[in-house]
């Protein structure tokens, strides 16, 4: 049996996104093979025995080792892989992407990069003055806010933080203060999917989304979010991801560079979920990519 798309997934909250992918496949007349923990063993066996094949891998297994044979099979046979695992791993390294962005002339917070604790347990003297009175400490490879310290103010906090993820580089970043627009912070999370961008208002503390209207883009000069996100896409070379951008009194500042482990929960099911229609259109874009690459 040959399928157009193979979709490995296990996170229960992906269910609505999976339904969107199913719907898009039906609309575009593509076949979909879902691989979950319940059918993983037989699916891998069928794949390697040649009983099942597929053309495009849309992997939502989020790096779970037990699903890796599917990615390996696709890579070895030159199949289309949406957000290839090795590219995701590279682009999720915040220290790496920081250097990519500043080389491309994209504005980021003032940043000091630190080597992993295990590589350099004792740091040379650091001048923290450019970071301001309070700053942010981030491990380079974590997501979802893990290990991030807001409002840091001392060298002691830095030294202790590095020991939490001792194999990772760390970023020390100046705190970004956004403008206020419509009584809310000018802080945005932008979805990117196969050339299309979807900017949203996004509160940095509550993580609640609000869709941005074309009138708001025009009135408050926010159309640049589209171009800035496409520039990031050209650097990371991923098919879909989100990025976090703030508008300060001076300019747009990219705060959280590339996130490809997208939280696909939808707003009608979770207060801090993404707008439903955006996630549905993202699914259409990804299925369209699979259709176009057949």
Image (cartoon, rainbow, N blue to C red):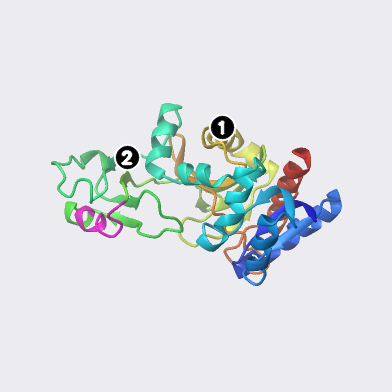
Q: Where does the image place residue 153, in percent across and percent down from the top left?
A: 23, 53
The residue nearer to you, when weighing 168 against 161, is: 168
Q: Is residue 9 visible?
A: yes
Q: Residue furthest bottom?
A: 38
* Secondary structure category for the residue under label 1: helix
Q: Where does the image place residue 285, in percent across and percent down from the top left?
A: 73, 45
* Position above or below: 284 against 292: below
Residue 148: image tag: none
In the rendered image, which residue does mark 2 sit on?
111
Q: Residue at x 43, y 32 (%)?
A: 100
> Along the horizontal axis of the image, is 205 left or right of 37?
left
Q: Which quarter of the rendering shows the C terminus?
A: top right
**Stretch of the chain drawn in magenta:** 158-167
The residue nearer to you, when weighing 267 against 192, is: 192
Disc 2 crowd, CA 10 A, few/some/many (<14, 14-19, 20+): many
Label 1 vs label 2: CA separation? 22 Å
Q: Where does the image place residue 190, in percent across and percent down from the top left?
A: 58, 46
In the rendered image, which residue does mark 1 sit on?
234
Q: Is residue 197 visible?
A: no
Q: Residue at x 34, y 51 (%)?
A: 138
Q: Where does the image place residue 187, in percent across and percent down from the top left?
A: 50, 48
For the residues labelled 1 and 2, say whether their Cβ atoms are less than 8 Å apart: no
The residue nearer to you, when weighing 126 against 60, is: 60
């Amino acid at each position: 049996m040959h399928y157009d798309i193979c979709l490995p997934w296990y996170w229960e909250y992906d269910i609505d996104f999976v339904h969107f992918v199913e719907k898009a496949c039906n609309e575009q007349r593509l076949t979909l093979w879902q691989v979950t923990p319940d059918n993983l063993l037989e699916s891998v066996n069928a794949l390697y025995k040649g009983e099942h094949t597929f053309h495009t891998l849309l992997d939502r297994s989020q790096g779970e080792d037990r699903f890796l044979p599917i990615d390996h099979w696709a890579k070895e046979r030159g199949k289309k892989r949406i957000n290839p695992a090795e590219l995701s791993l590279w682009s999720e390294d915040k220290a790496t992407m920081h250097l990519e962005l500043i080389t491309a002339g994209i504005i980021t917070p003032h940043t000091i990069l630190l080597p992993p604790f295990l590589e350099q347990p004792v740091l040379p003297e650091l001048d923290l003055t450019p970071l301001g009175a309070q700053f942010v400490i981030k491990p380079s490879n974590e997501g979802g806010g893990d290990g991030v310290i807001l409002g840091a103010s001392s060298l002691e906090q830095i030294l202790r933080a590095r020991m939490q993820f001792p194999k990772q580089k760390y970023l020390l970043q100046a705190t970004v203060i956004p403008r206020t627009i419509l009584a809310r912070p000018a802080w945005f999370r932008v979805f990117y999917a196969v050339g299309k961008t979807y900017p949203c208002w996004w509160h940095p503390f509550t993580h609640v989304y609000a869709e941005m209207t074309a009138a708001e883009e025009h009135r408050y000069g926010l159309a640049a979010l589209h171009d800035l996100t496409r520039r990031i896409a050209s650097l990371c070379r991923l098919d879909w991801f989100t990025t976090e951008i703030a508008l300060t009194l001076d300019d747009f500042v990219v705060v959280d560079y590339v996130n490809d482990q997208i939280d696909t929960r939808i707003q009608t099911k979770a207060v801090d979920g993404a707008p439903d229609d955006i996630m549905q259109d993202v699914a259409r874009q990804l299925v369209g990519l699979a259709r176009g690459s057949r």
